């Protein structure tokens, strides 16, 4: 199906998924960090104090996502998404009124759980369940919300905060979210899309794995070692970008001002990924994704000239685009759609947990005198090793999907 026809025939469902990923930006690090200066100044926190509090809030959110995320399998998606939106709005209100550490911790935990975790979880579960032969296009279209959010959402908050202050800015966000975004997503997604019989693929008609069975599958954990590389490595580098630019002698504006390059490559890669997934399956994206991670990090790890920034942004942008699509499509291909929400909630929790540990662990190593450029290069070499491993796993995944391998008889159904 040609993309214009696909977009026209499925506009309401794709728009719902796109809005969910777009406004998941409210819970992303790049958005919350815009208020970090005001938070630290008003609550008397150092950079390290706020960093540790943020890490523990993120870890707490990761622990709760598997419990909250599984209900998307038993609730209508528009109702589940509505509850997530309300939870995120209440977290924004809490941040606006956070005058002590306890309220700040609760607000950050809510932003990370509902925003980074469950908003995107709702979108990708819906796309994975509602689409089959065109799942790649659906997932990549919805994932464009992430890319657009990184480009325009920070600018919008800076403008709002300049007018009313950072606390009132979060209240404006919450009001906008409930009054406009909530009804829009509810109306768009209240009619479920049922895949036509002609478009069902083998992975939708084969065995339907439960969450417990998927987590006991060695292939699940092997794939996670490669799939998590872009968000963990990317978060680690961007979290320490000020320190990196100081070591390299770059102006911070050179690094931050190059993010449009990242966005352009991410959008292009996301669109290409949709076609690749529909034709070849999502697993084929993983080796290429990791190669781009390696190129980006090895360049910054070993090259001091400022042109390395552009290569880093192009490489990580491409990796982010491939990751956003593969992350949403690979689980229904492998494990079916009946328990997709429960399985993806664990995957999302692991992703959030890993991205919280990356900056904290790297900061601990910096404090102990281990050079950051060397760590960036080491992450690049890890990506190379993981890419080689994913080449072998690609064959295993393709064989399993093609043969519609059933759930092992010995596995329980928990």
Image (cartoon, helix red, strand yellow):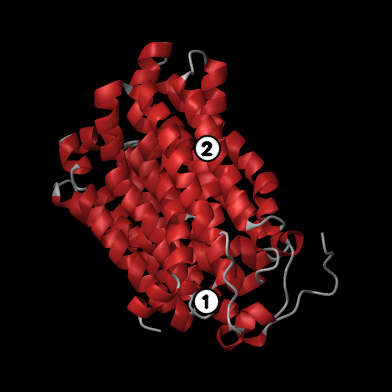
Image height of 199 relative to 365, above or below: below
Give the structural element (helix, strand or loop) at label 1: helix
Callout 2 crowding tier (Cα within 10 Å): few <14, some 14–19, many ≥20: many
**Position in image of residue 86 (x %, y %):** 56, 38
Which mark is nearer the camera, 1 or 2? 2
Tag 1 residue: 394
**Position in image of residue 119 (x %, y %):** 52, 48
Image height of 46 relative to 135, above or below: above
- Left or right of 119? Residue 164 is left
**Position in image of residue 291 (x %, y %):** 36, 65
- Left or right of 297? Residue 76 is right
Quadrant housing residue 197? bottom right
Q: Residue at point 18% right, 46% down? A: 304
Q: Residue at point 43% right, 12% down? A: 43
Say whether disc 1 or disc 2 marks the residue closer to the N-terminus: 2
- Left or right of 72? Residue 184 is left
Image height of 348 relative to 247, above or below: below
Q: Which mark is residue 88?
A: 2
Q: Quadrant of the N terminus?
A: bottom left
Badge 1 vs badge 2, beta-carbon distance below 8 Å? no
Q: Which mark is residue 361?
A: none
Asked whether residue 225 is in view, the answer is: no
* In-front residue for pair 117/9: 9
* In-front residue for pair 75/348: 75
**Position in image of residue 368 (x %, y %):** 42, 28
Q: Residue at point 21% right, 51% down? A: 260
Asked whether residue 127 is in view, the answer is: yes
């Amino acid at each position: 199906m040609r993309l214009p026809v696909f977009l026209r025939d499925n506009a309401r469902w794709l728009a719902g998924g796109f809005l969910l990923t777009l406004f998941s930006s409210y819970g992303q690090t790049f958005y919350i960090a815009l208020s970090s200066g005001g938070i630290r100044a008003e609550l008397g926190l150092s950079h390290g104090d706020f960093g540790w509090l943020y890490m523990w809030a993120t870890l707490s959110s990761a622990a709760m996502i598997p419990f909250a995320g599984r209900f998307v399998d038993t609730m209508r998606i528009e109702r589940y998404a509505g509850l997530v939106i309300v939870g995120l709005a209440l977290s924004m209100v809490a941040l606006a009124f956070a005058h002590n550490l306890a309220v700040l911790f609760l607000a950050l935990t809510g932003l990370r759980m509902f925003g980074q975790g469950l908003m995107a979880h709702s979108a990708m579960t819906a796309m994975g369940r509602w689409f089959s032969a065109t799942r790649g296009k659906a997932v990549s279209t919805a994932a464009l919300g992430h890319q657009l959010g990184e480009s325009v959402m920070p600018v919008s908050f800076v403008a709002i905060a300049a007018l009313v202050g950072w606390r009132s800015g979060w209240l404006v966000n919450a009001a906008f979210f409930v009054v406009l975004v909530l009804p829009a997503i509810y109306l768009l997604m209240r009619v479920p899309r049922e895949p036509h019989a002609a478009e069902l693929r083998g992975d939708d008609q084969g065995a339907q794995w439960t969450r417990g069975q998927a987590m006991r599958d060695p292939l699940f954990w092997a794939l996670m070692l490669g799939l998590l590389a872009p968000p963990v490595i990317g978060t680690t580098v961007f979290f320490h970008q000020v320190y990196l630019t100081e070591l390299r002698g770059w102006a911070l504006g050179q690094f931050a001002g190059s993010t449009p390059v990242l966005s352009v490559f991410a959008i292009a890669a996301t669109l290409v990924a949709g076609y690749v997934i529909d034709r070849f399956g999502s697993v084929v994206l993983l080796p290429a994704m990791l190669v781009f991670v390696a190129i980006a990090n090895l360049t910054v790890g070993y090259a001091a000239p400022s042109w390395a920034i552009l290569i880093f942004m192009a490489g990580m942008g491409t990796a982010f685009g491939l990751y956003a699509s593969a992350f949403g499509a690979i689980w229904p291909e492998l494990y079916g759609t009946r328990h997709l929400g429960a399985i993806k909630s664990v995957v999302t929790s692991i992703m959030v947990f890993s991205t919280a540990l990356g900056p904290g662990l790297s900061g601990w190593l910096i404090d102990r005198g281990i050079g950051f450029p060397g760590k960036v290069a080491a992450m690049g070499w890890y990506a190379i090793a993981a890419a080689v491993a994913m080449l072998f796993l690609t064959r295993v995944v393709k064989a399993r999907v093609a043969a519609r391998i059933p759930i092992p008889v010995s596995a329980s159904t928990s």
